[in-house]
Structure formats: structure tokens, C-alpha cells
Image (spheres, helix red, strand yellow):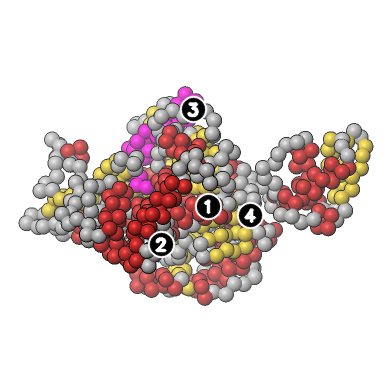
Amino acid sequence: MTVEVPAGSAADLAAAIEHLVRRYTGGADVWRHYGKVDLRAGGGGVTVDCEDERLERCLARDLARVLAGEALTRTTMEPEVEELDTSTLGQSIPDRFVRVAQVWPDRPAVRADDGELTYHELYRMASGIAAAVEAAIGGTGGQVGIMLGHGRRTPAAIMGVLLSGNAYVPLDPGYPAGRLRYMAEHARIGLILVEPGTAGLAAELTGVPTVDVTTVQARDGAGTGPSTADSVAYVLYTSGSTGRPKGVLQSHRNVQFQVRNHVTRHEITGDDKVSVLSSFSFDASVTDLFTALVTGATAVLVDIRTHGLGHLARRLTETGVTIYHSTPTVYRYLLGSLGPGDKLPSIRVILLGGEELTARDVRLYREHFEPHCVFVNGYGATEVSFACQNHVTMAGEVPDGVLPIGRPLDGVEVVLLAPDGERAALHGEIVVRSSHVSVGYWENDEANAAKFLEVDGVRAYRTGDVGRRLPDGRIVFAGRTDRQVKIRGYRVELGEVEAALADHPAVGQVAAVARPKTDGTSEIVAYVAPAGGQQIDAILLRKQVGTTLPHFMVPAAVVVLDALPLTPTGKIDARALPEPTHRGTAQAPRTDTERLVAGVWCDVLGVPSVGLDENFFDAGGHSLLMATVARLLEERLGREIPLHRLFQYPTVASLAAHLAEETAATGGLTAVADRMARRRIARKPGRQP
């Protein structure tokens, strides 16, 4: 095979070829690495003959463009691994992963806070785990729980379960014990993969056999395993309106479809570094992790809950993440941790989903990212992954207000249904019509019948969202048909929150609502009225529901009323429920450190005062707000404060006492204030170094 290029000198061609091969290989010498490359003039151009057919295919793609003066932003040896197309939908996830691992064994597959793995190392670790799973449960087609942190072993455990021919069920160790127990029992999990920090929790909750992945020996891969394209890949649990979470099933084929759309849409290759920020209990992790592992890219895992937002910003820069994906809430907190004009230069795609986006989010994007970066508003659900996307660039005006969710992706149709079930042209419930929506809910016939249907002979999913179609074909989110809300990007059924509160014997009436906050997010506020003759302690009640609900579903406040207001028809009148008021405290801070901590708490929580012994989370805080507290304290104290210390000392008094001990060793608050004053002066615009 030959490559025809425009006429030019052999020296120019040699330089261009060497440049490209260095890009392909990260610096390998073209003449030594690939053998002889012959250049022959004739026929109005120059013919390039290569002994290496793979090199020749790549040069056929890129050489003429380089000689024409075109700048290539990314070059890879991608032709060695088959493109993601319709043929890959007939493969299992391990089929594709093993192929990538064989072609690029030394390429970094996973970079996490606790270490890194090449594709070869990941394949061997996953193969060892697959063998351990097979030995423990002796079959395929079952469910295996994964109770691990956000580290390098989790992708290996996931791939190991898939290699064994089983489906994985994420069991987030940060979830309340009652919820984990229900998920393990409901999913009929036959084995749980653990690590030393979670082994005791797993044994206490479930009684299911466990395997500690840190003790499993890596082994050479023995193939792709028994899974097929139609095998179930995972079961992810989402909030349920009946008071119990629902298990969403998805097949290998449908995951491959999701990944193919993602890869094609954003031109993702082995050169990319893909962030994996969400818990593995959520579908965002599916898109991010498998996008990396079936293309030869690097999955960059960052544990925000443990290390905070300052750590996230540092890791994004250190690892050179190119594809960033998170909820809008995390995105806003991340950019809030940056200084004015600070940029994240390596990122070329920002993909946000789970909440509404506004023009302000676009303005933040234009301030903190480079001109080549694209901003994407993604819309979807666990049952369908992404269904629509809206791409925004640095150029052009963005109207104030909420951004449209965009147009349907390839292979997806968005149907707007009227209340009578007929298609509506411009306004109606968003129904996602595609052959690749979820397989269904695990052992939940009622929910399956309510949410899945056929539209014109094709499987479809009723999202419960209301959409409005614009003249240009884009869709705008216009509310819900039910009581589902989004809290910091998490899907929450208010009925499940109410069911948890109603379990308390002192509660006679209950209502949960989502109230908007001044920062554009929403929080859950619960209202309860006591059963006859009972007394309700709001703080204790909130703590109790925290033992059954995950952190994002726990109400920010519980308001106790004598009786809940009713409409003339006897239903609870949500509009008449009062705004919650903060109790505050009569006890003033006693020391400089307490005043500093209390001031930061008030700024972050948006309250006038906090109690010295009041728990941060009882005051309405959550983990992302705690990360903001850590950042502000670091700025004002001039030193790094590990996020886990704030969880360890969750009151003003305890945290101030801890910080005071450390501050005493660094010269006291006066010295800290002097250092911070000098830093503020140094950061003033126009100051010359």
C-alpha cells in the first residue's frame, strides 16, 4: 500500500514523518522503531512506502494534512483497534477491553489518588478477581456487590466481575447501613468484593460471603469471559417513589451503545484523560469509566468526598484531564475554588448533567477554560444514559435563563407525549425512544409497567420530565409530571424521604419539599406534625432518617408544626408551608479561632449565626459545602487542611480547638493574618513582581 502526498522535497517529507511518528509513539525514533521508509518521486507527487502497515495507515490519515500546514491537535495509532461502530454493539464490554489491553499494554489505564494501573496491570488484576469470583460463586448470570472506595482497585473489580460473566452492583460504603442491607438483599447478591476498610461493614450488614480484593493475586488474562452482548452488566439503584430504591438493569450491548455515542460525539481517543468523579453507584461513572477503558484512554479517578475541591482542581491539572464530567453543582463548587482568571487548560470538553444549567454557568466556562474547550449540557437518566446534548462554544451570545437540553443523540428519538398518550408537537412528557434504553427494573413489575412502553414498535422510557420543543428542534426542560426532584445532581423521589420520616412512631403527618436556595441549588425541607400526644425532636429525627437515607436525601432541615396546612380538598398545601428558620445561638464565639470558623460556617451556610456545639450537617450542610469550608479556611489560615479533619471535628468548638493547637505551632493567628494580607496584596491586579 502506498500513500500519495503533494509534491515536495524528501527532506520536508522526512521531517513531517518523523514529527508524526514522535506524536504517535511519544518520542520513539522513526527510523529505528519502524524500519525503512522509502520515498519515491513521480506521478506529480511523492509515494511513501512503509514496511509497517500500521504506520502506513496512520500516515495515510495524517501526512497530507501536516504537509498542507494543518495543525493536528491529537494524533494516535487508533487504527490498530477497530473503530466503535454498530459492529461493536454485538460485543461484550470485556471483548472490547481485552482487545485494548492487548494492543496497548503499557498505556496508563487508571490514575487514582491511591495509585495507577497500566492496561496490562489492570487486565491481570481484573483476571485475578474474575477467578476469585468464579471460585466463590461457581456460576454466571448472578449479581456481585462491590463495596470499595474511589480507588484504582474499583475499576479492576468491576471489570473482574464482568469477565466472570456476572453483573456488578455498586454498594457505596458511604450509604447508610439500612439502605445497603436492602440493596444487597433485594439484588440477591451472592458475593461482595471488599477491602480492609469495608470488610467489617459488609459482613455486619449482609452475611453474604466476601472477597478482599487486596488479597487477590493478579494473573495472566485467560480471554474475555462468558458474557455476551445481551448479558446484564450492572444493577444501579435509584430513588423510588414507593419508599424503596429501584434497581436499574443494563446490558453490555446498551452500555456499548452509550459509550459509542459518547466517543463519537466528543472524538475521544487513546490520547484522552477522562475524569471519573461520581460515585460508582451512579450512571455517570458508567459513561466515564467504560469510555476510557474501551478506547485506550486513561480513566482519572478523583475522590472528592475524601480530599475536597482544592484537591480536585490540582488533580485535574496534574493529570492533564481532557474530558471533564460532573454535575453542575460540583462544577460550580470547583470553579468557585479557583481564583479570578485561573484556568484549567488541558480540558477540551466539559460535560455537565443532572441539573438545569444557566447562562451563568456558560460565563464561568468562558472565564476558566481555553478557547478550544466545548461546553456541553447533557440530559438523560439512569434508565437511558444520555439522550440529548446541547453544545456551546466560546463564541456567540447565550440568552439569560435556563439552557436548552439540546437535540437527541444518534439512535435516540425524543417523543413528547400529551396527557392522553398521543404524540405532541411542542409540549409534553419527555419519552426516550430507543432500542437501547434500560432492560428494566430488577424484580419490580409495577415500575416496569409504569415507566417502559413501546412507541411505534420501539422500546421507550417515560422520564416523567416535561419538555418544550423550540423551533430549531432543541428541547427545553419544563418541569416534572411527578414529585421527583434533583438535589446536587442526584435524583430524589420526595415520597421516599417522606416514607423514611413516617417510620418514626412520633410522626403523624409529613411532607417533604424541595426549596430553592440563593446560590441556585435546591435543598430538601421536611415538615412534620406529631401523632397524638407525642413530642418530636427535629434534630434527632433528622439523624434517624440519616441512618436509612443516603446523604443527598437527608433533609437540610426538619420543621415541626402542630399540624400541616391542608387544601379545601384535604391534601397537604405545600404552598402554605412556612420557610424554615435557623435557630441560631445565644452563645458567642469565645476565641479568635472560634470567630474565624463560625464566620466561615455562616458565610457558607447562608445563616446569621451557628451554635458552637451544633453539628455542621444538622445546620444544613453537606459534603460539598464542607469542601468549601475547607477551602476558605485554607485561604484564611494559609495552610492545607485535610477534608477528613472537618468531618472528624464537625462543630465550631471542636474544629476551632483542633485548629488552635496547630496554629499555635505556626506563630498564632496574628502571624497567619499577616501572611494572608501579604498574599492578598501580591494577588492585586496590576502588581509587578
Q: What residue type is labelled 1?
A: Leu
- Identify the residue at image location x=90%, y=33%: 44
Q: Where is residue 473 in the image (x, y as percent from the top left)?
A: 49, 28
Quote the CA–CA distance across marks 3 and 1: 28 Å
Q: Quadrant of residue 648?
A: bottom left
Quote the CA–CA distance across marks 3 and 2: 40 Å
Which residue is identified by label 3?
A: 397
Side of 220 relative to 511 (left or right): right
Badge number at residue 684: none
Q: What stretch is highlighted in magenta?
A: 462-488
Q: Position of residue 649 (x, y in %)?
A: 31, 64
Q: Do the residues labelled 2 and 1 touch (CB within 8 Å)?
A: no
Badge nearest the viewer, 3 or 4: 3
Badge number at residue 296: 4
- Identify the residue at image location x=62%, y=59%: 108
Which residue is identified by label 1?
A: 316
